[in-house]
Amino acid sequence: MTQRKLILCEKPSVAQTISAVLGVNKRLDGYFEGRDLLISWCYGHLVEHSPAETYGEQYAKWAYETLPLLPKVWKFKAASGKKKQLDIISKLISRSDVGTIVLATDAGREGELIGRLVYDHVRCKKPMERLWLTSLEDSSIREGFENLRPISDFDNLYKAALCRSKADFIVGINYTRLFSCLYGATLNVGRVQSPTLALIVNRESAIENFTSEPFYTPEIYCDGQHYGEFTAQGERQATFEDAEKIRHAADGIPPHRRSHVSGGRGEAVRKLFRSLYGGYGSRWETVLDRYVQRFRNTALLYRLVLRDALCDTTHLYT
């Protein structure tokens, strides 16, 4: 028996595009079928977190005494209104002529989560490969399908997505119930929603309470001999005298000799010169190198902090 590949896309429009490029033109209920390929799709998330009450009867009602809810074994279920498509995918995966699953959800953290949750939910044990597409041009689809990547290449991306999903659940469930119980009204709290709202509120408050105060900004002029003609501004100063001291200290000192500035205002002068070159002289490749290194360090810290807290991929599906 010929073993087929089942390609799982994130949305119907993508499945239709891929099916046209790969010549899989027979459309059935919830999927396309060809000689060697089956192509199906999700409607965004087909699997979602189970509600709080599935973790215990005490969580059926909102009560301060039952908080916090911190699942030890995470539970997931079919998303509301999407069980039909999930069942179709489950049956396709279970077919004896399907030997490999090709994950073709969107190339990103959320796309990875959407596909992996479906794979886990139906308890699939068949091998899986990744079709990583950043473009839906015909040539990109063909090239991507000819160079399918091991799914293990994206395990960390999946774990990061799962961490984000669990963090949303923990923050949303616990803080929404907490503040609603404390204030006697439904107060929705979210990991992203609430900080964003706080930014808006704080900014509006700052505008309403703004008091105009004079400030003075030191400037230096470069004549263009070495770096081109331009003017750079330093940090705002509360008094004219402070700004003048910085300006005078900077007079006649070329940017590449800024480290020789001395005195109590030396750091302020260096900040003024850093406004010209981002703090690293005119070598922009150095800026890029340092940015990339900082990103790597941040990513490493993120993994270390969340690995034990949220990355348990043991699921119990209902």
Image (spheres, rainbow, N blue to C red):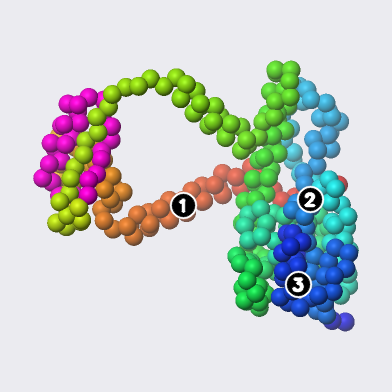
Dot label at residue 295: 1
Give how far across and how far down residue 171 sits, in percent.
66, 34
239, 45: nearer the viewer:
239
Q: Are marks 3 and 1 in contact (CB under 8 Å)?
A: no
Q: Calculate the distance from the C-alpha at mark 2 to the C-alpha at mark 3.
A: 24 Å
Q: What residue type is labelled 2?
A: Val
Task: Kindly identify which residue carries mark 2.
Answer: 47
User: How dense is the environment of label 2, judged by Cα within 10 Å: few (below 14), some, or many (20 and up)?
Assistant: many
Q: Residue 33 is drawn in which quadrant?
A: bottom right
Q: Which residue is drawn at 10% across and 45% down?
A: 252
Residue at image mark 3: 19
Q: In this view, does 252 lie to the left or right of 41?
A: left
Q: Which amino acid does label 3 sit on?
A: Ser
Residue at image point 56% right, 44% down: 305
Q: Residues within 10 Å of mark 1 (few under 14, many from 20)?
A: few
- The percent position of residue 28, horizontal first and vertical second, equals 88, 68
| Rendered location of residue 224, percent (x, y) | 17, 54
Identity of the residue drawn at 66% across and 40% down = 167
Sequence-first tag of 2 and 3: 3
Which badge, 2 or 1, comes first in the chain's sequence?
2
Chain part drawn in magenta: 230-255
Q: Which of marks 2 and 3 is in front?
A: 3
Q: How many labels does the image show?
A: 3
Magenta-span inclusion, residue 246: yes
Q: Which amino acid does label 1 sit on?
A: Phe
User: In what quadrant of the picture does the N terminus appear?
Assistant: bottom right
Residue 4 seen in this snapshot: no
